[in-house]
């Protein structure tokens, strides 16, 4: 089986797996980073969103081969103690209910705020168009994104 | 336990209070199913460091039970809720409880837990009294310390009192604190699970990563009604590391990597036989009406319908439908099972650990003591995880691979295929209003697909008849409890019908309800909703697109007001504003309750406008979220939530009530906007366009 090098949450990792293995399973099963979730397997729910070179991407639609040589950041990589500005805003607004979709939402929020310090409602709708939350936390996500606005470097 | 006992004193009986083991160690013998444990030790343990462990059979689905139950314990013991560690849904460690559903945690479990905490407080105070040589009346307690009020240096802690000692106390009836002394109840307390759920640390059933876990992918029939009769697994078995397990008609492909297991499964050629149901999503409504007809029973009947109809000046006949709808939890059904030393352990995404225990034991012909269910954080339930076919599958496979943890994680297609849907239903109502437009003279309702549950509200409609079918296996597809079962179907029909009556009689929808409502709580709630929305009702359709509906779930009452914009060329409905006024008695954690209402409104915007399981025979046509349309950010209106302040000490559940009137309020808003009555949930653009065609030209 081929091996691939990638940087995950700032750390160099070597992974031995098929080239077409979805990055989602590499993160969850090979590297044990289970914060990133499976929701649909087709890139239409957003639960598996991570950063690839700073861009929010769906890890279920990104192969290991595509990720190789690039920098991957997962929700665990934002911070493990909740100190990232987006995580802080999420806690302050008590966004999460079941919480399953939230890592993906948080990664999209962090990527959005990095590119646009003060997003409008429309920007938020666009950035989260591929995300779903069954518990209905959207109004609080909107508030949390605005609370974190300007605080993400 | 009667619900009135909550906050008003709990009959605890004679009790034994032991402090023998640290929190979470030696398991308590599970108490018998069907009854709440009477020994407070089943619920509470105080560890040497003074932290309080709270053990309950409920689970955290996102509804906030973990936080609100910790608040109640902390309230009695004068702790910060952060000092209470919740251990939930472990059938070896937690006392028996009913499933987490029906909005019953606050009705059933909260009073029991509060009684246990009140008694623990009394026991601790007596122990401190002895240790400090002062009467209980002279003691104060806070944050795990107890001291003499007049001499604060004379103090002890919960941890010191219980450390390494075994004690017995027999106490009688202990009253929880009166509401006026409560400092936590009614205050915003942040969720206990917030940090874990924002850092990725929260563990769901699929996150366990037990060493040696094999992922099991199960061969599914292409349609309901078909069963596996033969399978060619040769190609799959040639893949390195693949194992095949068969157990009756269950065939699973096992591999350490989930995607490899999926790939191998695709190589298995199954032969299926059986008969698919002969019906589809278009014909289902007539199918239900026809199949239910011979089994229709009169469930409620009052007065003389024929005489009532003679007195009617305005008569409306309506037929209301709703499609099958999936729970579509973001976390699909997931379980990990391990068979070891004659015992089956299942880590499950479940709303019902004790029901799962029974079901797994029955499926494997084991005693219930040989099955251990450990609930994890649940990635959404809504009634869908009250039952656990996936947990049974995992256990059946694990039984054949001793010592190996087996993970069964349905993918989205399986989850949409195997879900027990919200039942499709048809409600027919014929009803009339008197000439004075103040009384419903008759109301004749027949439902097929669900029961008459929650069909009635406290409206003055004394001459009535409700019929519902007593037909087993009415549905061609598997159905289940979907957040406030029956209630949303019946509320949609009732509130649409009332709106139609009001419009036909030239009355505004609020005035009609004011005249009909017989319950002071509901009347106050209606006024609160209308005032908060700042709305001058007028007979519809006014073109403003504002609609109102009332609903109930048990004692919880809701009044919803929706404002929509309808694009008459595309049929698209956009929700612009949505308000709910909610009366669920005493609100323990206001922000948590608000979360539930916001979520229910959002969820049911999807129910009303877009969510429908399409099927042909036994084939489910919606396989993922590209065609099964959940509401997304762009569908969300400005949401307002207001709670009735009714000075009660009785608290009720919040998960379900706010679901009930959402679709009806939106349908009535569509009527107010356009004059078109949408009667089929979901009212997709196609159905709105059809309804618009039926509007008579002026």
Image (cartoon, coloured by chain):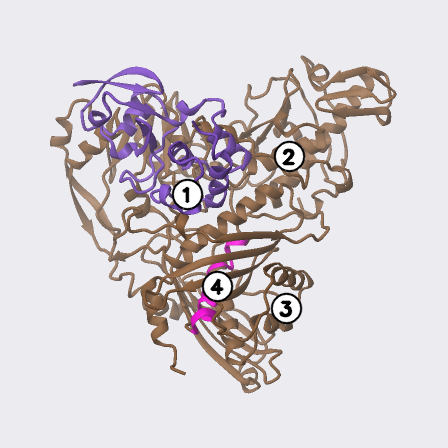
Residue depicted at x 50% and y 24%: A83
| Mark carried by residue A133 | 1
> Which label's residue is closer to the chain start, 2 or 3?
2
Chain B painted colour: brown
Q: Which chain is purple?
A: A
Give the main secondary structure of the magenta stretch: helix
Alpha carbon of mark 2 to alpha carbon of mark 3: how far? 36 Å
SS for callout 1: loop
Please state if B501 lies on the left or on the right of B200 as rendered: right
SS for callout 4: helix
Please state if B196 lies on the left or on the right of B140 as rendered: left
Alpha carbon of mark 4 to alpha carbon of mark 3: how far? 17 Å
The disc numbered 4 marks a residue on which chain? B
Disc 4 + disc 3, Cβ < 8 Å = no
Residue depicted at x 63% and y 68%: B517
Would you say residue B660 sits in the magenta stretch?
A: yes
Q: Nearer the viewer, mark 4 or mark 2?
A: 4
Dot 2 alpha-carbon crowd within 10 angstroms: few under 14, some 14 to 19, many 20 or more: many
- Pointer 1 and pointer 2 on the same chain: no
The disc numbered 2 marks a residue on which chain? B
Which residue lies under the disc numbered 3? B517
């Amino acid at each position: 089986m081929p091996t691939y090098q990638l940087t995950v949450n700032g750390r160099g990792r070597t992974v031995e797996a098929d080239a077409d293995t979805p990055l989602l399973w590499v993160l969850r099963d090979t590297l044990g980073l289970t914060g990133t979730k499976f929701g649909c397997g087709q890139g239409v729910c957003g639960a598996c969103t991570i950063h690839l070179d700073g861009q929010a991407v769906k890890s279920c639609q990104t192969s290991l081969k595509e990720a190789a040589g690039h920098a991957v950041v997962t929700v665990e990589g934002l911070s493990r103690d909740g100190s990232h500005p987006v995580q802080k805003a999420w806690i302050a607004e008590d966004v999460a209910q079941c919480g399953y979709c939230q890592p993906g939402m948080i990664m999209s929020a962090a990527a959005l705020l990095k590119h646009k310090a003060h997003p409008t409602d429309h920007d938020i709708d666009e950035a989260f168009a591929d995300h779903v939350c069954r518990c209905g936390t959207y109004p609080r996500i909107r508030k949390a994104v605005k609370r974190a606005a300007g605080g993400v470097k | 336990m009667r619900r009135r006992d909550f906050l008003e004193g709990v009959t605890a009986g004679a009790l034994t209070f032991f402090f023998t083991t640290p929190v979470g160690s030696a398991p308590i013998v599970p108490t018998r199913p069907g009854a709440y444990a009477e020994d407070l030790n089943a619920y509470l343990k105080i560890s040497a460091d003074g932290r309080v462990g709270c053990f309950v059979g409920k689970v955290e689905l996102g509804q906030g039970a973990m936080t609100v139950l910790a608040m109640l314990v902390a309230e009695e013991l004068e702790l910060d809720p952060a000092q209470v560690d919740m251990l939930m849904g472990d059938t070896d460690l937690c006392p028996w409880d009913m499933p987490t559903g029906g909005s019953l945690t606050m009705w059933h479990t909260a009073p029991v837990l509060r009684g246990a905490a009140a008694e623990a407080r009394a026991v601790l105070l007596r122990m401190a009294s002895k240790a400090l040589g002062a009467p209980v009346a002279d003691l104060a307690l806070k944050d795990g310390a107890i001291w003499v009020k007049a001499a604060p240096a004379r103090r002890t802690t919960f941890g010191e009192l219980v450390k390494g000692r075994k004690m017995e106390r027999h106490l009688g009836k202990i009253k929880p604190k009166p509401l006026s002394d409560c400092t936590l109840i009614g205050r915003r307390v942040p969720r206990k699970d917030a940090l874990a759920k924002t850092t990725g640390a929260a563990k769901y059933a699929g996150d366990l990563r037990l060493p040696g876990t094999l992922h099991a992918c199960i061969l599914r029939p292409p349609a309901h009604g078909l069963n596996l009769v033969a399978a060619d697994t040769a190609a799959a078995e040639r893949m390195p590391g693949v194992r095949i397990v068969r157990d009756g008609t269950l065939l699973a492909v096992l591999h350490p990597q989930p995607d490899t297991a999926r790939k191998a499964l695709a190589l298995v050629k199954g032969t299926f036989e059986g008969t698919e149901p002969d019906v589809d999503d278009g014909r289902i409504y007539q199918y239900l009406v026809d199949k239910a007809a011979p089994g229709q029973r009169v469930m409620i009947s009052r007065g003389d319908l024929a005489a009532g109809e003679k007195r009617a000046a305005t008569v409306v006949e309506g037929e209301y439908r709703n499609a099958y709808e999936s729970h579509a939890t973001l976390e699909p059904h997931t379980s990990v099972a391990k068979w070891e030393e004659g015992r089956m352990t299942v880590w499950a995404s479940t709303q019902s650990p004790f029901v799962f225990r029974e079901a797994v034991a029955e499926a494997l012909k084991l005693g219930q003591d040989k099955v251990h269910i450990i609930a994890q954080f649940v990635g959404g339930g809504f009634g869908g995880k009250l039952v656990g076919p996936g947990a049974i599958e995992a256990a059946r496979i694990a039984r054949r691979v001793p010592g190996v943890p087996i993970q069964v994680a349905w993918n989205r297609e399986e989850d949409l295929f195997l879900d027990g849907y919200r039942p499709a239903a048809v409600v027919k109502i014929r009803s009339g209003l008197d000439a004075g437009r103040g009384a419903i003279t008759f109301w004749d309702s027949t439902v097929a697909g669900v029961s008459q549950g929650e069909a009635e509200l406290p409206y003055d409609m004394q001459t009535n008849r409700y019929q519902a079918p007593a037909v087993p296996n009415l549905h061609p597809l598997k159905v289940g409890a979907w957040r406030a079962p029956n209630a949303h179907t019946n509320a949609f029909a009732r509130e649409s019908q009332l709106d139609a009556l009001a419009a036909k009689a030239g009355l505004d929808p609020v005035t009609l309800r004011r005249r009909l409502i017989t319950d002071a709580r509901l009347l106050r709630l209606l006024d609160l909703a209308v005032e908060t929305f700042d709305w001058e009702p007028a007979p519809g359709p006014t073109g403003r697109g504002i609609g109102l509906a009332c609903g109930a779930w048990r004692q919880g009452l809701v009044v919803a007001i929706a404002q929509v914009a309808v694009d008459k060329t595309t049929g698209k409905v956009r929700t612009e504003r949505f308000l709910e006024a909610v009366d669920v008695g005493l609100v323990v954690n206001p922000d948590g309750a608000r979360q539930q209402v916001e979520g229910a409104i959002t969820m049911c915007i999807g129910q009303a406008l877009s969510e429908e399981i399409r099927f042909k025979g036994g084939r489910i046509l919606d396989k993922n979220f590209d065609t099964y349309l959940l509401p997304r950010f762009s569908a969300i209106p400005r949401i307002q939530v207001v709670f009735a302040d009714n000075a009660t000490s009785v608290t009720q559940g919040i998960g379900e009530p706010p679901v009930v009137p959402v679709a009806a309020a939106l349908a009535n808003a569509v009527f107010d906007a356009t004059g078109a009555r949408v009667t089929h949930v979901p009212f997709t653009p196609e159905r709105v366009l059809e309804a618009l065609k039926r509007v008579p030209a002026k």
